[in-house]
Image: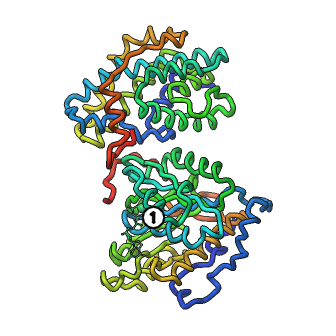
Amino acid sequence: MPEPTTIVPAVTTESADGRRSADAPASAVDPTSVSTVSRPGAARRALRLGVAGPVGTGKSSLIATVCRALAREIRLGVITNDIFTDEDARFLRSAGVLDPERIRAVETGACPHTAIRDDVTANLAAVEQLEVDFDPLDVVLVESGGDNLTATFSPALVDAQLFVLDVAGGGDVARKGGPGIGRADLLVVNKIDLAPHVGVDVEQMVADGLEAREGRPVLALSRHREETVAQLRSWVLNMLAAHQAGLHEPQDPGPMAPHFHAGEVEPHTHDEAHDHDHAHQG
Amino acid sequence: MNVPSTTLAMMLADSRLPIGAHVSSNALEAALLGGLSPGRIGEYLATRMDTVARVEAGAAVLARHLAQRDQPLAALHAEWAARTPSRAQRRIAAVLGDGLRRLADRLWPGSLSTDAGSPRPLVLGAIAAIAGLGPRDLARLVAYDDAQTVVAAALKLEPGDPRQGTALVLEACARFEPHIDALAALQDPTLLPSAGAPQIEGWSEDQSVLPRRLFRA
Ligand SMILES: Nc1nc2c(ncn2[C@@H]2O[C@H](COP(=O)(O)OP(=O)(O)OP(=O)(O)O)[C@@H](O)[C@H]2O)c(=O)[nH]1
Ligand SMILES: [Mg+2]
Ligand SMILES: [Zn+2]
Ligand SMILES: [Zn+2]
């Protein structure tokens, strides 16, 4: 099976110079063609796209940005995960970027990471219900509750995932690595407009991310910089096109380091029971 | 899939069962905020064993009985709801019932007799009917799960010696044991125990509107 990075163009800061190659033409994802895709292996259901990352790095804002950029072109739905009640869902509804009924909250209780990884029951039920209620949807965005650097989505819940860091969390974070930083489908270095104020070198942070990710894409983002929003938009459309064409294989970013089994060609990682209690950030 | 009743009970009682149950504290969080002292969690469990756990276990046993005979569960659902006056309790029972139904659909495809929205005790009873879990194991499973849910939540809310929590679970199960015979013999939904616990119902309601709660129920 093809490596996803070979079909999804790497979106890096280098493309900030306005190269059009990163911008998929709108026709690449014609909404009317979605439900009629019938190539073997092609997906019929919506692309389920996870957005993970530590507390406050801008996951909800990123989802609002994606909705703002794409809600007129493709059919979107959103599931938020919150430790406490449904604040993120309410924030997104009030942002006015998507029909409020298409935004639903899942309450994860004390461990947000269980709900996206070990026991995805509540999230899967919510995603499936949303897909039924608004059939057909093109993309369902799932925001994880802000957890720590080890929290990533199970491929049983999402087809692809973004891991969101921000410059305010410190320039070193990308270098520290971890499953989300190293192996999410896209690493976002968010709030780059703040970099001068917090003394962070964005180029260095992106370079650290690229190194930790062995070439997987890194996107430097600020919702205040249109060119970076355009790159995010393209990445989502490219991933959707790959999903619809049956060319994207969901990957588990971790928690284990990539390894080989006898008879396998591609390295992979494993799920592991989350049977510990741990402090969550925030 | 043919496994003995004991194995089924162990599997269904395992907190690692993927049905999304980690969001419930059985209202312990609201109870602690409402003044229950952590030293009295054993008493909270004892009260649950004599009240809500009997209703839940009885409903599960009755669902098993009816499902085995291909009889409808609607009347039982109504009897259970009448004895579960807290809307919050009925809600979380439906959410957890749905998680259990999703699991059962995978383990015993197409065999489950409960509708979507069925509360957990009814889904458990229906599973017991198709998988061969006996009425006694079923009633004990409900009680064990009720106590273990409270104790696991207590370890997050008011951490103490976890071994003490395990002792409390066993004590609760022992407390429940005298109810087993009567519960296991139930066949008529109208005879489902009506053992209300207004304080627990109140805490369940409080829990459903708690700001910044760690547990949904
Ligand atoms: N300057 C700047 N601030 C941003 C940007 N994106 C988000 N923020 C701010 O960052 C803060 C946190 O944003 P959220 O989107 O709520 O972050 P989150 O990751 O969803 O937070 P949790 O769900 O609580 O983990 C808010 O005050 C946002 O306004 C950005 O691009 N630039
Ligand atoms: Mg958020
Ligand atoms: Zn966790
Ligand atoms: Zn392996």
Q: Is residue A78 left or right of residue A26?
A: left
Q: Position of residue B117 (x, y in %)?
A: 56, 33
Residue in the image at 52% along x and 29% along y: B119
Q: Quadrant of residue A55?
A: bottom left
Q: Foreground residue, A159 or A132?
A: A132
- Image quarter (top left, top right, bottom left or bottom right) of the C terminus of chain A: bottom left
Q: Position of residue B122 (x, y in %)?
A: 54, 25
Q: Position of residue A88 (x, y in %)?
A: 43, 58
Q: Position of residue A184 (x, y in %)?
A: 52, 66
Residue in the image at 55% along x and 67% along y: A67
Q: Which amino acid does label 1 sit on?
A: Ser
Up the image or down, A86 lies above or below A17; here it is above
- In the rendered picture of this protein, how many numbered marks are placed on residues? 1
Chain assignment, label 1: A
Residue in the image at 51% along x and 52% along y: A104
Q: Is residue A211 visible?
A: no
Q: Foreground residue, A263 or B71?
A: B71
Up the image or down, A247 lies above or below B32; here it is below
Q: Quadrant of residue B35?
A: top left
Q: Is residue A103 left or right of residue A204?
A: right
- Which residue is labeled 1 in the image? A60
Up the image or down, A249 lies above or below B107; here it is below
Q: Is residue A36 left or right of residue B154?
A: right
Q: Is mark 1 within 8 Å of ligand 2?
A: yes
Secondary structure state at the residue bearing disc 1: helix
Ligand 2 resides in the quarter of the picture at bottom left
Q: Foreground residue, A259 or A187?
A: A187
- Image quarter (top left, top right, bottom left or bottom right) of the N terminus of chain A: bottom right
Q: Foreground residue, A232 or B7?
A: A232
Q: In this view, does B41 lie to the left or right of A201?
A: left
- The residue furthest bottom is A17
